[in-house]
């Protein structure tokens, strides 16, 4: 055969055996498209899958909490007219960087604000410390009662008169503020002194046993007839249990008053096992501190009472007369924020 003819046949056969370039590209493209479609389908299936019930519950709770309206409180309004000097003092205190710390529920904070009148109170550098108050802030640890002032880096507790704020802040000494009206006279002390309010709830066996154990073990319960948390402490024991408590009255005008030790700097206070404990104590705490072992029947019937330090009773509003006949709104100018009464202030609002 002719060699040229044979070479031509081999070339044609080689070309025929080689797959076309378009076929190779089509097969690769198809594979890539198929892989992409598979991945997209898997993502779509994952996106459409229902989340676990626990996740749904958490999301629903978070959404409900976010949508739940929060109630915030503001201090009572001040309606009295302001003098130019009152407004100038309020503006000076704010410009100086002073701070007036208070709480919307504090009657003495309301009295402090009222000293500046409606115009001056708007310029006051007021800081709301109550967590549920409008625009509340975290107040410094030096603020242990309301109202409190911070002037030139120093803290001053209690309600201050305008002349006192004038002196503390260095305000224009040529300005003369009118003297505040004197407070009403306190109620006359009854014969024998003021008595603790009566406890009307009956006692459980454990309450009586615990009160008796505290007295027999040498514990002492220090308080004052006007102290709200002292009343709550006594009420925790019921009528018979309260009568059995080793109670010592520290108020000078209280019935059977005694001189209390220097370690007692607030009411209520306990001395158990030679150690002093300040503040309202729960049944559990008193049981633990005094090593009291109640009987099984008594323990089952015992109420637990409020947790320690809880604000069990809302503060009294200004001008309301207490069940002892005492108007606490005209008392001392310091209101404690915790479950202790401040001994020097004579108030437990």
Image (cartoon, grey):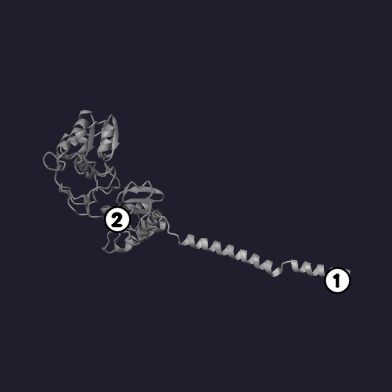
Image position, residue 240 (x, y; %): 14, 37
Give the residue at mark 2: 104
Residue 92 shown left or right of residue 200 in the figure? right
- Is residue 184 in view from this perspective? yes
Can you name the residue that lies furthest to the left here? 191
- Specify the quadrant that holds the N terminus: bottom right
Which marked residue is nearer to the observer: mark 2 or mark 1? 1
Residue 233 picture quarter: top left
Image position, residue 169 (x, y; %): 38, 53
Separation (CA) of disc 2 from disc 1: 112 Å
Residue 248 shown left or right of residue 37 in the figure? left
Can you name the residue that lies furthest to the front here? 1
Can you name the residue that lies furthest to the right here? 2
Label drawn at residue 5: 1
- Foreground residue among 225 and 122: 225
Image position, residue 156 (x, y; %): 34, 48
Q: Residues within 10 Å of mark 1 (few under 14, many from 20)?
A: few
Q: Secondary structure at mark 1?
A: helix
Image position, residue 145 (x, y; %): 31, 47
Residue 303 shown left or right of residue 22 in the figure? left
Residue 201 picture quarter: top left
Q: Residue drawn 60% across and 66% down?
A: 33
Q: Residues within 10 Å of mark 2 (few under 14, many from 20)?
A: some
Residue 146 shown left or right of residue 241 in the figure? right
Vertical placement of residue 283 versus 157, above or below: above
């Amino acid at each position: 055969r002719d060699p040229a003819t044979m070479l031509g046949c081999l070339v044609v056969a080689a070309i025929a055996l080689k797959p076309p370039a378009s076929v190779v590209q089509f097969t690769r493209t198809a594979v890539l498209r198929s892989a992409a479609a598979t991945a997209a389908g898997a993502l779509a299936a994952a996106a459409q899958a229902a989340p676990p019930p626990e996740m749904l519950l958490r999301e629903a709770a978070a959404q409900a909490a976010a949508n739940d309206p929060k109630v915030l409180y503001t201090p009572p309004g001040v309606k009295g007219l302001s003098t130019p000097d009152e407004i100038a003092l309020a503006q000076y205190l704010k410009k100086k960087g002073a701070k007036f710390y208070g709480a919307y529920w504090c009657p003495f904070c309301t009295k402090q604000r009222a000293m500046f009148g409606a115009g001056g109170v708007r310029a006051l550098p007021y800081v709301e410390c109550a967590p549920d108050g409008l625009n509340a802030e975290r107040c410094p640890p030096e603020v242990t009662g309301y109202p409190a002032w911070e002037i030139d880096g120093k803290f001053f507790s209690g309600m201050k008169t305008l002349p006192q704020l004038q002196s503390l802040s260095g305000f224009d000494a040529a300005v003369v503020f009118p003297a505040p009206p004197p407070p009403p006279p306190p109620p006359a002390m009854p014969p024998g002194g003021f008595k603790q309010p009566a406890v009307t709830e009956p006692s459980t066996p454990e309450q009586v046993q615990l009160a008796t154990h505290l007295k027999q073990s040498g514990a002492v319960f220090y308080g004052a007839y006007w102290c709200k948390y002292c009343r709550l402490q006594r009420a925790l024991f019921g009528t018979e249990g309260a009568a059995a408590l080793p109670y010592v009255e520290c108020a000078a005008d209280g019935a059977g008053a005694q001189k209390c030790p220097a370690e007692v700097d607030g009411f209520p206070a306990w001395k158990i096992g030679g150690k002093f404990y300040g503040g309202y104590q729960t049944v559990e705490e008193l049981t633990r501190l005094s090593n009291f072992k109640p009987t099984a029947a008594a323990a089952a019937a015992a109420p637990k009472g409020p947790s320690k330090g809880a604000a069990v009773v809302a503060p009294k509003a200004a001008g309301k007369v207490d069940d002892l006949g005492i108007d606490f709104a005209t008392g001392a100018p310091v209101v404690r924020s915790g479950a202790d009464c401040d001994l020097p202030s004579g108030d437990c609002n």
